[in-house]
Image (cartoon, rainbow, N blue to C red):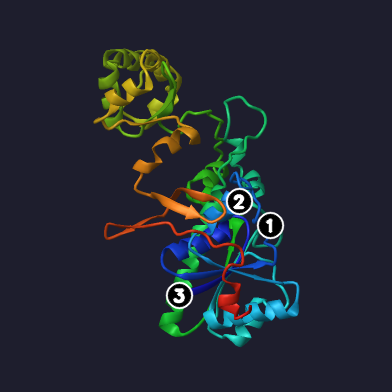
Amino acid sequence: MRVIELSSFVAAPLGGMTLAQLGADVIRVDQEGGGPDIDRWPLAPSGKSLYWAGLNKGKRSVEVDLRSAEGRTAVARLIEDAGIVLTNAPPRPGLTYEELRRKRPDLIHVQLVGMREGGNAVDYTVNAATGFPSLTGQEGADVPSNHVLPAWDIACGLYLTVGLLAAERHRLRTGEGRGVQVALSDVALATAGNLGYLAEAQLGGRRPRLGNYLFGDFGRDFATGDGRVMVVVLTARHWHDLLQVTGMGEVAEALERALDADFRTAGDRYHHREALAGILTPWFAGRTCAEVEERLKGTSVLHSRYRDFADIVTDLHTRPLMAELDQPGIGPHLAPGSPLVFDGVPIAPVAAPALGGHTGEILGTP
């Protein structure tokens, strides 16, 4: 499978990289000199974009002058030959779906847009419009709280991949091409609906900000003697094991009687979360993170120490996902392969190309 990618930002490059990691020949086409991602932060000490390198692993790269008719004609020929294009670029003369389909009737054209009804959008504007910042942040805060993870871009990139593969299966079956469109705002809205958030609001519910508490059950962060841990309870067994480890079983039973509650149920654990946190806090405060982890190991209780990226990189070599990658212009470092594992065999990372590094090879130009 060969895919021509004209893209920028996160979602479309992630879709292309996912296909490349699965074995597709993905040819990324950029404007001469590079598009808006070529120097996007974070940067390596050399000044090269770690962002660009991270999202383009395993692809080939072509530079053309997309502003010129000659450059667009060269790209149109690539698309006609490959039969598959993945893009979030605004349509240019000679590269619209209708023009390309006239030359290749069975074309698969996968297009990412901001909003289905028209208009531009990026992850951060979509997130603001979808309501999630109103639920994020500390309880009682009166301003919205954004998060740093571009969740909708990531989900959208994987939707693009699934849509492209579904269209390719359809073409194998019928010989027909397909125009596939995915809107970033639709991905966010669908997720809010699929999780029940929109129906809850329609039916009169109003979800509060909870800080680091879990909505609908018991979960929160606890300070230890040397850090913080997140503890999550989702079942009666989790709760039983947490009480066993902390020795709070009798205290919890007394609290149940006083509150006329049953902490085996998620609703009661959630409604009385502050009281439960109060009886558990001293146990965590009197131990280090390592001691907490050791005590919880082997139980069903869901837990994790809070770590920052600097902490994580100290043991990356132990993670099966990661492998040594010598990226031109950046140097050797550990990078992720594909999270997908087939028959027990991991998919190792492949370096991103130098911008335009395959132009001559692919276009037959010097």
Q: Earlier in the sequence, mark 3 or mark 2?
A: 3
Do the numbered discs 3 and 2 sit on residues whose CB atoms are within 8 Å? Answer: no
On-image quarter of the C terminus? bottom right
Q: Is residue 18 above or below residue 279?
A: below
Which residue, given by chain and number where applicable, does mark 3 sit on?
Answer: 1
Residue at 52 percent across and 44 percent down: it is 197
Can residue 61 be seen here? yes
Q: Secondary structure at mark 1?
A: loop
Circle 3 packing at 10 Å, graded few (<14), some (14-19), many (20+), is: few
Foreground label between 3 and 2: 2
Q: Is residue 59 toward the left or the right of residue 42 in the image? A: left
Viewer-closest of 209 and 75 = 75
As shown in the figure, which amino acid type bears the numbered disc 2?
Answer: Ser
Task: Give the Cα separation between the discs numbered 1 and 2.
Answer: 11 Å
- Which residue does the numbered mark 2 point to in the structure image? 49
Q: Is residue 190 visible?
A: no
Can you give x and y, in whole percent of width and height, for residue 220 in the image? 44, 27
Distance from the alpha carbon under mark 3 to that under mark 2: 28 Å
67 up-or-down from 190: above or below: below
Q: Residue at x 61, y 51 (%)?
A: 48
**Residue located at (67% from left, 76% from top):** 96
The crowding category of the residue bearing disc 1, from other C-alpha atoms within 10 Å (few below 14, some 14 to 19, many at least 20), is: few
Asked which secondary structure carries label 3, the reply is: loop
Query: Residue 226 location in percent, x, y?
Result: 43, 18
Mark in front: 1 vs 2 = 2
Amino acid type at circle 3 is Met
**Type of amino acid at the residue the image marks with label 1:** Pro
Instruction: Name the residue tied to disc 1.
Output: 36
